[in-house]
Amino acid sequence: MSLSVLSRKEKERVIRRLLIQAPPGEFVNAFDDLCLLIRDEKLMHQQGECAGHQHCQKYSVPLCIDGNPVLLSHHNVVGDFRFFDFQSKLSFKFDLLQNQLKDIQSHGIIRNETEYLRNVVLCALKLYVNDHYPAGNCNVLRKTVKKKEFLIACIEDHSYETRDCWNGLWKSKWIFQINPFLTQVTGRIFVQAHFFKAVNLHIEISKDLKESLEVVNQAQLALNFARLVEEQENIFQAAVLEELQELSNEALRKILRRDLPVTRTLIDWQRILSDLNLVMYPKLGYVIYSRSVLCNWII
């Protein structure tokens, strides 16, 4: 169906849906491509602002305020397309298309024991992130639900390599309630990758977790929490790598007409050619050389 046939409301729904589906790191590219199709600048910017706000929450878009990283999520939304940062105590709007903060305002917080614990947990989490992520960011938020206080820890790292035709995102979220002796930690780890060089391939992997954590004191709680996150994310990473290796092997088996031995060692084809006296037969030598390239690629 032509876009000119759609009503304005239908166009708005289509634009929002397509922009929200944009993979992490590709929102602006998707917006620019849609602008060429829609040719309605006012409509595109209206829907781009709304979709960009949702995109930031969905993929924990990182910012830097006063030298401190801030991860945007639905947990620090304060209404009217505004976000709140606990460290700088500022609320603001973020224009994803222009990549800039707007309408920055001061926003006070209640300083209590939970706020102190939030800072302690953030320090412990930063040590873990700095040791395990090349360019990772983390943030710890606090939230009160039905007079119960929760801490929400968020981790994000990404690598957007558009020139090499791939983008990847790792993010995780951990929530636990402030209890005197024992608390339950609810976590979710999410990985998304997009390859678009010779094929349009999307990979999304996620895992939900629930673990118990003993509460002794604030310092010990923060250290135990960081160890818990490290242990669970290491387990998840190992499982993902194993699954992708199995997927790769399975794909190769389907592509090849017959199974080839995978020795994971380099083969000295020149020595084999010399031993078999095949140098004088260019055509046969070419066949063996082609297979050597394939085997080296598999290895």
Image (cartoon, helix red, strand yellow):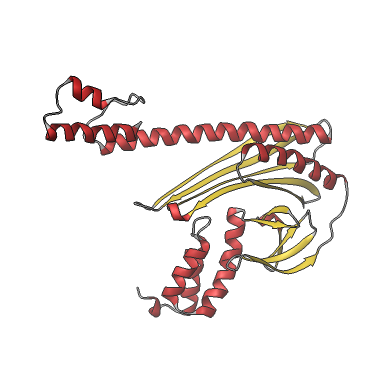
Query: Residue 279 location, x and y as percent?
Result: 15, 28
Residue 113 position, x and y percent, is: 87, 44
Residue 181 appears in view: no
* Residue sitting farthest toward the right: 112
Image quarter (top left, top right, bottom left or bottom right) of the C terminus:
top left
* Nearest the eye: 186 or 148: 186
Q: Is residue 260 above or below residue 74?
A: above
Q: Which residue is rendered at x = 19% and y = 19% of the image? A: 275
Residue 76 in the image: state x and y as whole percent.
Answer: 71, 57
Tell me where residue 270 appears, x and y as whole percent: 24, 26
- 84 above or below 142? below
- What residue is at 58 percent from the left and 32 percent from the top? 234
74 in relation to 129, above or below: below
Name the residue nearer the viewer: 237 or 99: 99
Q: Quadrant of residue 88?
A: bottom right
In this picture, residue 104 sits left or right of residue 243: right
Q: Could you say which quadrant of the image residue 267 lies in?
A: top left
Specify whether 278 is left or right of 206.
Answer: left
In the image, residue 20 sits, relative to residue 228, either above or below, namely below
Number of numbered tags placed on the structure image:
0
Residue 237, quarter of picture: top right
Q: Quadrant of the N terminus?
A: bottom left
Which residue is found at the position 75% from the left and 33% from the top?
Answer: 223
Give 286 or 123, whichever is nearer the viewer. 286
Q: Residue at x 84, y 57 (%)?
A: 109
Can residue 57 be spotted in the picture? yes
* Left or right: where 222 falls relative to 198: right
